[in-house]
Image (cartoon, helix red, strand yellow):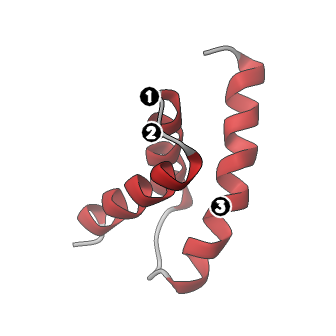
Amino acid sequence: MDVTELAGLLHEAEEHHGAYEAVAPVHHWWDWYAAYIVARDGGSAEDQAVAEAGRHMEAVLR
């Protein structure tokens, strides 16, 4: 992954994180972003990456 691709994924993650953050308990944004970016880099579609980040956060917040 190069800087341009990472910057694009960070921007995309920012766009999707807002909906999660609005209903989520207090959390560190970077946990959600990291899970989202890893999922996207692994080939997941945007909606799949959102779901994977949500599942990751459920585990983190337990």
Q: Tell whether 52 sits left or right of 62.
A: right
Residue designated by label 3 = 16
Classify residue 18 by image quadrant.
bottom right
Cα separation between marks 2 and 1:
5 Å
Helix, strand or loop for disc 2: helix
Q: Are marks 3 and 1 in contact (CB under 8 Å)?
A: no
Q: Are marks 2 and 1 in contact (CB under 8 Å)?
A: yes
Question: Does residue 47 sit above or below 6 in this rendering?
Answer: below
Residue at 78% in and 21% down: 4
Label 1: few (<14), some (14–19) or many (≥20) C-alpha neighbours in 10 Å: few
Instruction: Say what amino acid the circle numbered 2 marks.
Output: Ala
Classify residue 15 by image quadrant.
bottom right
Helix, strand or loop for disc 3: helix
Residue designated by label 1 = 42
Helix, strand or loop for disc 1: loop
Please state, as top left, top right, bottom left or bottom right, where the N terminus lies in the image. top right
Q: Residue 54: horizontal and vertical position, in percent?
A: 40, 64
Cα separation between marks 3 and 2:
13 Å
Classify residue 8 by image quadrant.
top right
Q: Residue 30: horizontal and vertical position, in percent?
A: 53, 52
Instruction: Say what amino acid the circle numbered 1 marks.
Output: Gly
Q: Tell whether 25 sits left or right of 11.
A: left
Label 2: few (<14), some (14–19) or many (≥20) C-alpha neighbours in 10 Å: some
Disc on res. 30: none
Question: Does residue 25 sit above or below 62 in this rendering?
Answer: below
Residue at 53% in and 39% down: 37
Label 3: few (<14), some (14–19) or many (≥20) C-alpha neighbours in 10 Å: some
- Toward the viewer: 53 or 29? 53
Cα separation between marks 3 and 1:
17 Å
Residue designated by label 2 = 39
